Amino acid sequence: MIEVKNVTKSFGDLTVLHNISAVFEAGKTNLIIGQSGSGKTVLMKSVIGIHRVEEGQILYDGRDIAAMTKKEVFRLRREVGMLFQGSALFDSMTVEENVRFPLEMFSDKSRDEWNERVEFCLNRVELGRAAKLYPSEISGGMQKRAAIARAIVLQPKYLFCDEPNSGLDPKTSLTIDKLIHEITTEFGITTIVNTHDMNSVMEIGDKVIFIHKGYKSWEGDKDSIFESGNQDLEDLVFASNLYKKVKKYHNLK
Amino acid sequence: MNFFEHVGRYSRLMAGVFTKPQRWSMLFKQYLAEIEKQGIQSLGITIIISIFIGSAITMQMVLNTENPMLPKYVTGLTTRETLLLEFSSTILCLILAGKVGSNIASEIGTMRITEQIDALKIMGVNAENYLILPKIMGFVTIVPVLVIFSMFFGLVGGYLIATTGVISPAQYVMGIQYAFNPYYVTYSVVKSLFFAFIISSVSSYYGYYAYGGALDVGKASTNAVVNSSIIILLFNVILTDLLLV
């Protein structure tokens, strides 16, 4: 579980996050949603520890990242997996080498155990056949799956996903969403997904936190979004034509 | 960004680079890969350039030493001194700054803009140490070898020209052996070690702090080559003063 308590973050005179508090629960897919520029990426980067916050606490199962030394942060990061917007696979390595990399860096297990774990993770994301290919030789969706395999290879307690569906078609997005959700519940990971894809919200949003202009504007689960009564949230959710039509159709019925 | 900010940021980066590696086996693996990538793959261009420059220097020396007061072997001698003292260390390293420096800056810069460096950091990897230390170590190891190759093939280039009849090959061979001072080779190799460090670290610096898109990686690469070259030329003067004068 990750707890964010009264976090404020500024860049110079510009305050990007205002007194945000939230709880990201273990075994659940926690979504941070909001418009571009609302502060959701800054919130995620602050939670990971890339940005130091001026005020507030970020607690990883009770351990405050803001109070940690650099060495302690490095150690904590071995419990963290991250899926980047652009996958961030290492171009010079094959898919298999990418997945093996964290093990080579940090695991003291034997080579056979590494191979077994890599094989397990690749099969889990259904990429066993692409193991020997380079990232440039596989599709965007496959790259995302390879990045998920790399993120879970060290059995992380916390998984961060930054816009996991960006650049993917709706069907592949759904596959990635389902995979993230399954892995989260299967391994009891605390997963935080940063997204503005409403399909993802409806698909995997066990818990949704809506950030608007740097403030936490709403919190709830995917099913309570439509009854939120939050105008800013509704404006975001029904921004696309598809959702407008669905809403119109729903209202007519 | 002013000069002092660059120096400060470069120093901070180097402090991160020269720390204990998290995995020695990974460092060794990367180190060998860098020797292959930066050194072995530069061998061809080193040999080609050295042969042609050696040939050109010999022809120019024939013209410049055409004087009945000067013995014929002076051509070989001056060719050797030019190659040993300046070409095979400084000029070769300026050429390598273009080839290897731009390669390092664009590789690390691309990793930066595609979030690969962030991925390393999130994993808990000391990205500066993991990415840059093997490059510096590999290049500093292999550059003296390239310098020795350059000296040898430069002299071979001169000999090939001598065989065409512009000067007697025997006189040329006598010239390149005459009054040979082995310290000049040491001087050249020592200089190249400094230059190799400058090329690899400065290029890594520009790549590591690249931001934006592909265009910015190109800019970082250009800055890496230009600034490495200027620093090499500056250090050439300083090292010559310290080691030779």
Image (tube, coloured by chain):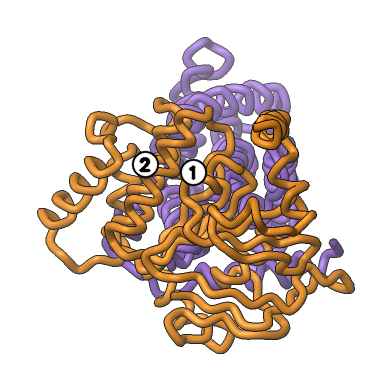
Chain colours: A orange, B purple
Horizontal placement of B94 versus A100: left or right?
Answer: right
- The residue to which callout 1 is attached is A87
Task: Specify whether disc 2 shares its chain with disc 1.
Answer: yes
Quadrant in which the C terminus of chain B is drawn = bottom right
State how far apart marks 2 and 1 are (Cα): 8 Å
Q: Position of residue A92 (x, y in %)?
A: 41, 39
Q: Position of residue B215 (x, y in %)?
A: 73, 35
Chain containing mark 1: A
Q: Residue at x 48, y 63 (%)?
A: B122
Q: Position of residue A197 (x, y in %)?
A: 60, 42
Picture disc at residue B76: none
**Which element carries disc 1, helix, strand or loop?**
loop
Horizontal placement of A33 versus B184: left or right?
Answer: right
Chain containing mark 2: A
Horizontal placement of A179 versus A253: left or right?
Answer: left
Of B153 and A171, the residue lying toward us: A171
In the rendered structure, which amino acid carries the disc numbered 2? Ala
Picture layout, residue A111 above or below residue B2: above
Picture disc at residue A146: 2
